Amino acid sequence: MPHIISPSLLTADFTNLSQEIDMLNRSQAQWIHLDVMDGVFVPNISFGFPVIESVRKLTDKILDAHLMIVEPDRYIERFASAGVNVLTVQAEACIHLNRTIHRIKESRMKTGVALNPHTPLVMVEEVLDIADMILIMSVNPGFGGQTFISGSLDRISRLKKMIDDRQLSTLIQVDGGVALNNAKELLNAGCDVLVAGNAIFGNENPEQVISELYEL
Ligand code: DX5
Ligand code: ZN
C-alpha cells in the first residue's frame, strides 16, 4: 500500500477555509487530519463539530479526527454523524480503551489509538489486533509547529516490529514536526500515515509539499 498523507488543518488559514480545502481536494493528500482539543487534556482549544461538519460538505476525502480530549466516549456518535471516517483517541484519556475501540467500530468508523511521547508502547499491546491504527505523537500534543522529538523514530521501529511479529496489518501514523527532511526516515521505520501541519500550510506552495511527501 502506498503511504498516506494527512495534512493537519490546525495550521490552515481559517479565514479562507474553503480555499484551503479546495487546495487539499486538488492535492495528492488522501486524508485530512482534524485536531480536536478541549483545553483539559491539552493546554489548548481548537475546533469542534461546526467546523468538522463544514469541512465534510467541502470534500470527499477521508476525515481523520484526532481527539485530544478527556472522556472521548461521550462524543463518538457525534463524530460519526459529522462525517468523520477515522477516529483516533488518546490512550491516556481512555480508562476502558477496549470498550472505546469497540464503540468506535460500532459507529462505523476506523479506530486509531494515540500515544503521547512518554507513554510506553505496551499501553497498546493488548489492542493492536482490534485497532486499525496506532498514532505515535512525535511532539507533546497541543500545538502545531513544534520540533520533532527524535526518540520517536525508535518508537516507530519498535511498534512496527510488534505489529509484524504478530502478522497484523495495523497502520502506524506519526504526528508532530513531520517535514520533508525527516519523512523518508519515518516511512523507512514503518510509518503508513504522515500527518503534517506547519510543513504544508506554512509553505508558500502547500500542494507541492504534499506532492513531494507523497512521492517519497
Ligand atoms: C499537535 C497536533 C498535530 C499538529 C501537527 O497536537 O496533534 O496534528 O497539528 O502540526 P505540525 O506538523 O506543525 O507539527
Ligand atoms: Zn494531530
Image (cartoon, rainbow, N blue to C red):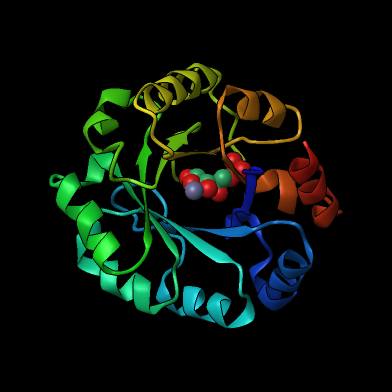
Vertical placement of residue 11 versus 159, above or below? below
Going 59% across and 54% down the picture, which residue do you hit?
8
Is there any visible trace of residue 144 in the rendered image?
Answer: no
Left or right, 201 with respect to 87, comes to: right
Q: Position of residue 65 (x, y in %)?
A: 45, 59
Instruction: Please identify the residue farthest to the front as the structure is shown.
Output: 167
Locate residue 114: give its quadrant. top left
* Residue at left offset 39%, top offset 28%: 163
Give the quadrant of ligand 1: top right
Q: Position of residue 88 (x, y in %)?
A: 38, 52
How many numbered marks, from 0 up? 0
The residue at 75%/74% (across/down) is: 19
Out of 101 and 73, give the one closest to the viewer. Answer: 101
- Toward the viewer: 142 or 5? 5
- In the rendered image, residue 43, in percent from the top left (x then y), is placed at 38, 47
Quarter of the N terminus within the rendering:
top right
Quarter of the image where one finds residue 133: top left
Q: In the displayed structure, does residue 176 sit left or right of residue 99?
A: right
Asked if 47 appears above or below 190 in the picture, the reply is below
In the image, residue 130 lies at what x, y percent? 28, 45
